[in-house]
Amino acid sequence: MQTLHKHAPFLLISIILAATFAIAYGASGSTDEMDKTAHYSVRFDALDTRIAHVQAEMTLQRGTIKMLAWGHPWLPEGWATFVENLVVTDLEGNPLNISPITEDGWGSWTVDAEDGTRLSLSYDVRFNHDQYDWFAAGGQDSRPSYSNGGLYLVSRALFFYSPYAIDDASVEFLIPEDWEISTPWPLIDDQPNTYFVESWSSLVSNMIVVGNHLRQVVNVDNMDVILAVDPSLEQHLGDFEDTLRLQLGSYSQMFGGAPSVIYLIAIREADEIEGESFHNSFSQIVIGDRLNQRRLIWANVFGHELFHFWNGANTLIGIEKSRVEWFGEGFTEYYASLTSFRTGILSEDIYHNKLARYFARYHISKHRWPAEPISLVEAGNDKPTNWLYLYGGGATIALILDVEIRDLTNTECGLNDVMHLMVRRFGDTNTRFDVDDVLDAVNQVSGSDFSDFFDRYIYGAEEMPDIAATLSKAGLVVDQYGDEFYVRRNPNPTVEQEAIYNAIFVREW
Ligand SMILES: [Zn+2]
């Protein structure tokens, strides 16, 4: 199920469109005076009712209220399939007529009131999402689930909104006394169990865990990471924390510090290993049995989802998500396994196997006769079909760029500097990027022109770079037979080869 933990970026396409539109709309002036704050109160009476009651207040915009239109298994009413007893009134309690939008509504209603009206919504959410097949919608880690007395929620299952009408929100939880709450949001002073949500994206794209779960707060730099863990995994809490410290520590060094944010990692037991990234949280499911022996698998998923905070889910976001999937997924995967190797989670043999698998996936994707090869940029238009290519090809491109940049800069700079520059240029300024922006960053860091490389291997469909030739510069030997690749270290490297190897795989970042 490697394919499916990667669906969060689909969701982000629409988030980006929505955000862009909101900015354009705001510029027209018509929404400037609108109250764009929403309030939600979410009440759970007991776990076994499998119901939450929600009271919400928000401003009506475009005559519409809705739930998120994606991330569900293409149910005609979308996430609202699980909503019951929806009643909408104005703030004086006068009922307002609502009618469902049946054609491509995906869970939206028109409301018979003027735009700008403050609405009061009352509804129940029934958590029987597990009765539907979520396979094509991100997998079981992408929907609400119960485990051992805890409810592992995705926030999009809970919240109605009116389009472009929410800049921030407060969310209050009313829960039984013995329940815990874990969210990726800060508490509001003097308001019990009430959280401040700083954006619409954060509201509809995050994890929330309520009920019985283990909760541990881990601090790395300025980042407060909340581990919300299934009680059945208690004996592994230390492994999760150690893994987090190793990987987040590496990413933090690479990006010049972890940002001052709350980040939530929800981990529950299931029958597979998988992960899904959200705005400032991720959901991970693991197999409880032989968890120690499977660390090489779950820790890589863990590192992958965590890296998405910077690349794909929060900090670096493409103007058109599909065009940079190879970067969002491939480079994220490259850094997940590279970090696992550098920190000792993966042995050298296993890491070399992993590299060989990236190359194989890349090679196979380029040789699917009679299908015509497509470019990495185009491949993002159909992620489920092209995931081998995006992950394998993208990770291979990342490694090749890393080695080539080290080679060109006498090992002083590498792909880390490209990532860091991208984050400074686009993440820190909340600007979206495109493929040429990656090229610009590579050119600047390397002091060389990679236009031809990008034309051939990123924009171009036909060719693959010479993997063996580039890796030999880092003292790695690659042997190939068809789609079989074998990677090993050159036992007698030159001084230059050894220096590049050390810069990428050994030297402190
Ligand atoms: Zn991913």
Image (cartoon, rainbow, N blue to C red):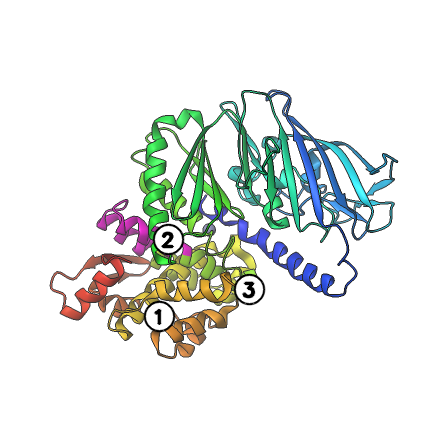
Residue 254 image point, x, y percent: 35, 58
The crowding category of the residue bearing disc 2, from other C-alpha atoms within 10 Å (few below 14, some 14 to 19, many at least 20), is some
- Please, is residue 188 above or below residue 509 in the view? above
Q: Residue at x 74, y 40 (%)?
A: 57
Instruction: Please state the extent of the stretch shown in magenta in the rendering.
Output: 332-357
* Side of 72 where 1 appears, left or right: left
The crowding category of the residue bearing disc 3, from other C-alpha atoms within 10 Å (few below 14, some 14 to 19, many at least 20), is some
Three-letter amino acid code of the residue under disc 2: Ser
Tag on residue 4?
none
Is the residue under label 1 in contact with that under label 2 (CB below 8 Å)?
no
Residue 509 image point, x, y percent: 29, 58
- Please, is residue 331 above or below residue 220 in the view? below
According to the image, label 3 marks what residue? Answer: 432
Does dot 3 land on a helix, a strand or a loop? loop
Magenta segment's dominant SS is: helix
- Please, is residue 361 above or below residue 448 in the view? above
Three-letter amino acid code of the residue under disc 1: Pro
Tag in front: 1 or 3: 3
Residue 150 image point, x, y percent: 52, 26
According to the image, label 2 marks what residue? Answer: 252
Q: Image quadrant of residue 472?
A: bottom left
User: Which comes before the other along the chain, label 2 or label 1?
Assistant: 2
Is 221 or 450 nearer to us in this picture? 221
Residue 103 image point, x, y percent: 78, 48
Does dot 2 land on a helix, a strand or a loop? helix
Residue 499 falls inside the magenta stretch: no
Tag in front: 2 or 1: 2
Residue 347 falls inside the magenta stretch: yes
Q: Is residue 364 visible?
A: no
* Side of 416 where 56 appears, left or right: right
